[in-house]
Image (tube, rainbow, N blue to C red):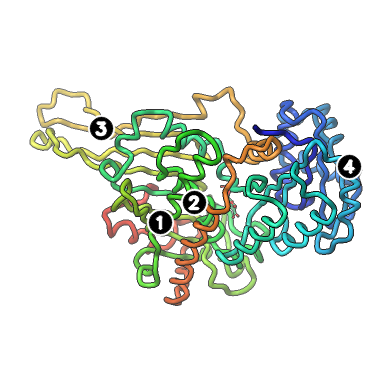
Amino acid sequence: MHQPVGKLLLFGATGDLAQRMLLPSLYALHADGLLPAGLTITGTARSDKDDASFRDFARAALDEFLPSDRQDDSAVASFLERLSYQALDASTLEGFDSLKEKIGDISGGLAIFLSTAPRLFGPTIKGLESAGLTGANVRIGLEKPLGRDLESSREINDIVAQAFPEDRTFRIDHYLGKETVQNILALRFGNSLFEPVWNAQGIESVQITVSETVGLEGRAGFYDETGALRDMVQNHMLQLVALIAMEPPARFDGTAIRDEKVKVFRSLRRIDAGDVPTLTVTGQYGGGAVKGEIVRDYATDLEKGSTTETFVAIKAHVDNWRWHGVPFYLRTGKRLAERRSEIVIQFRPVPHSIFAERGGALKPNQLVIRLQPEEYVRLLVMAKQPGLDREGVRLREVPLNLSLENEFAGTRRRIAYERLLLDLIEGDPTLFVRRDEVEAQWEWIDGIRAGWEANDVKPKPYASGSWGPSASVALTERDGVTWNE
Ligand code: BG6
């Protein structure tokens, strides 16, 4: 079924993602003996490098971004031997023949990883075609951004589809490579406990927070044209919504799982211009202190004024039987109080409390799935406080804690890209995003953006180091719900 390839071709091989993620991930797979034995890795980018200087570049990236206990001299040396480099200006056809020559025989299969500016997608695909690098044994992995709205995403998808049919196109959302994100599937579908209450009868609301402490991180131009909605909600956060809200798939494979996810995206209630003021909040960070460090406001970081949102909160609905009337509160932003990705499932209260007359107060159960930086699942349940109860029954909310770090203490946590690169090399599409998913995601996002434009929405300032603008608190408090902070 899945067929490993013998060659890997990396576009954008000298970029930031390659240094921080791709090269360290490939090295880790190599060091653990997980890469096909003869797999060669050809890097390409505009920079004028040869094999030797690309290997130096890769070694420097490993030095900087791999924890020192993972660096093994002989493994690094044998990893570097897999690497070669061909400089290429992907905007013209010239050069693709030399690239092909450099890669050599691809009869054993080729996987391409494209992490370049979107404007280069078209010329790159044309170049690959002209050089005969798009045949039936070639598959392509695409890194975001895949468009900035439905229309541009369709254009990109069309360009790619001319050369690569859907079953050979692997769209990356690195959140799907995260262990704890995949664990949502294990939790929901590997246990019989949750499913009977995993619906509007059992659940009152869902919160998803992806907060970051970082600011622009040297990508001011890109970020300012993108904003938090496109950068984080369209992809990562909606994937989390889908994994929480999807129906049980029949099997663990790319078709069954993605069929169920796309149904969730298509069930998202459209947020129209009239709903935007009550269902969405946008913000932009001001100056402040994050983790004790004084930081500057967005406009100063950017060196110009801007109306791009660095924070967004949304009250969403999945309009189907299972989720009828259950709000999904989403929020994400830069320069917030903490780095945290977390899902909070708020269950409904018990229908009748037997403790009320004895003074015992109950809190509805809550399930907290912490994806990062810690990895745990915590179920908050009511317990009786020890005592003789002369002054009434005392109940307290206590956590049932499942720390994945402790339970799997002996197992190394892998970078999300390790999983995704290996799946690309081996040809398993399950954790990649299908075209219909991306387009359904954009459709919903475009509706929100159109609503912002129609209402001339400007982001509200918030202090760096806070949890965003106060309007985001109001978004949930209006419904009697408090963000988990
Ligand atoms: C990327 C966004 O997709 O995800 C970045 O472009 C963001 O802006 C990053 O910082 C967050 O990823 P992670 O894995 O650190 O949560």
**Callout 1 crowding tier (Cα within 10 Å): few <14, some 14–19, many ≥20:** many
Mark 3 or mark 2, earlier in chain: 2
Of tags 4 and 1, the one toward the viewer is 4
Q: Nearer the viewer, mark 1 or mark 3?
A: 1
Q: How far across and how far down the image is residue 57, in percent?
A: 83, 45
Query: How far across and down, in percent of the image, does residue 124 sit?
Result: 77, 58
- Secondary structure at badge 2 equals helix
**Which mark, by number, is residue 382?**
3
On screen, residue 248 above or below 327: above
Tag count: 4
**Mark 2, residue position:** 237
Q: Earlier in the sequence, mark 2 or mark 1?
A: 2
Relative to 287, residue 355 above or below: above
Instruction: Say which mark, if any, is on residue 104.
Output: 4
What residue would you read off at disc 1?
268
Task: Identify the residue at image location x=85%, y=53%.
Answer: 131
Q: Contact (CB < 8 A) between labels 3 and 2? A: no
Q: Is residue 245 visible?
A: yes
Provide residue 60's location: percent of width, then percent of height.
81, 42
Give the percent coordinates (x, y) of residue 325. 28, 53
Q: Which mark is residue 217?
A: none
Q: Say which amino acid is labelled 3.
A: Met
- Point out the image quarter for the N terminus: top right
User: Under tag 3, what secondary structure?
Assistant: strand
Going from the N terminus, do you reach mark 4 or mark 2 first? 4
Apparent side of residue 81 relative to residue 421 in the rendered image (left or right): right
SS assignment at label 1:
loop
Residue that appears at 58% across and 70% down: 299
